[in-house]
Amino acid sequence: MSERKPKVVGFCCERHGADAVVLTARTGKQYDASVRLVQVPCTGRVDGIHILEALEKGADAVFVLGCLEKNCYYDTGSIEGRKRVGYVKSMLAEAGIEAERVEMFNAASTNAWAFPEIVSKMVEVAKRFGPIVPEGERR
Amino acid sequence: MIVAKRKPLGEIVEMLAPYKKVTVIGCRSCVAICLAGGEKEVKMLVSALKIKNKKDGRRQEFEGLVVERQCEKEWVKEVEDKILGSDVTLSMACSLGAQTIGDMYPKHLTFPGLNTGIFGVPEEQGLWSEKCVGCGNCIIHTTGGICPIARCAKSMLNGPCGGSANRKCEVNLEVDCAWSAIYDRLKLQNRLELIEEITPAKDWSASHSGGRRIIVREDARLTPHQKKGKEAVQ
């Protein structure tokens, strides 16, 4: 039986976050292609409900990738993103679900190795915890 | 406005556990402004409950919706079918909203999703502070616009208690002494003589101590004839 592919969703800002992804590709660095990326104008646009719905619909882990906090294209967008991620993590913890399934990351657009590292980390988290609902028990 | 806070998820899950079909109803009024029970919060709670249920293997149906003002029957009436079509309603409004639904549909179960907190004002984004306790007899015209009942831990009426030090309250050293603030405000307004005036013991009968209170405005009430007409239209 083939190994189950982890389901990781990444919300990625279209500035430094997306540039970091593009740079990763341009420099030929490898990352797990099973990650599903959702590009957003700014991580300040990511709301808790987007993250929760991704988990509800089957994602094992979700990350948000934005600009470096002191170099955010929209000044405080990535700070807002981090706060929203924090709130969702607290809700998950309250629900008895591993809060580590959701993380916030920041990357500079010139950092070619940040994105593969983030993906590896979240894929590892997804593999460690597995699906929220075990396969075959979809409810 | 009325400021409330969501109950812990575990408590909500426990409350709702015996029921299959749950309607979660938020309110676009105060609780939306204080980020406790508006549209976003309802959606997030429903989503979190669904994830929790999937994990725990519990089968429940959730529907989330929001009404304009849950404390007014007209708005609640608009979602009557959703309320009565469920086993239980979880109100994401303040207790007034939850009780309005409960009073309108007494046989139907309505549970609170929020803990109703204070009459507060937003001091800064994400921070609300209590400035009124609804005592029923406002005196802030004599105290520089600052309420000593709500803002003094001991509700002192004639100056600070002996515990106030360095302009801070002894109950919470991070909170300014209400009477220091009153002194400053009256000084700013050149009305410092007011602080010398003795305020007699407060008549608390206008407050909650007198039991459930009602406020009536006679000219706004419907006459029996008008009530009959309204009922006929409905």
Image (cartoon, rainbow, N blue to C red):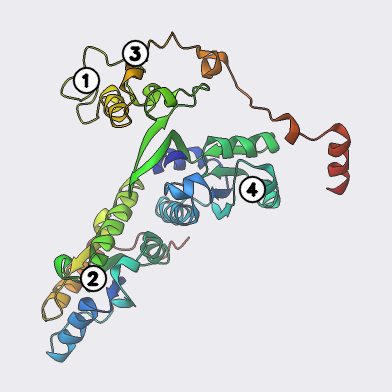
Task: Answer with left or right where residue B123 lies relative to residue B210.
Answer: left
Q: CA distance from mark 1 to mark 2?
A: 45 Å
Identify the residue under disc 3: B158
Q: Is residue B207 visible?
A: yes
Identify the residue under disc 2: A65
SS of the residue at dot 4? loop
Residue B8 vertical position relative to residue B153 in the rendered view, above or below: below
SS of the residue at dot 3? loop
The quarter of the displayed image where residue B51 is located? bottom left
Upstream in sequence: badge 3 or badge 4:
4
Crowdedness near tag 3: few (<14), some (14–19) or many (≥20) residues, C-alpha within 10 Å: some
| Mark sitting on residue B86 | 4
Q: Position of residue B115 (x, y in %)?
A: 45, 36
Q: Write down the chain letter for disc 4.
A: B
The quarter of the displayed image where residue B218 is located? top right
Mark 3 vs mark 2: in front:
3
Identify the residue under disc 1: B170
SS of the residue at dot 2? strand
Q: Label 4 is placed on what type of residue?
A: Ser
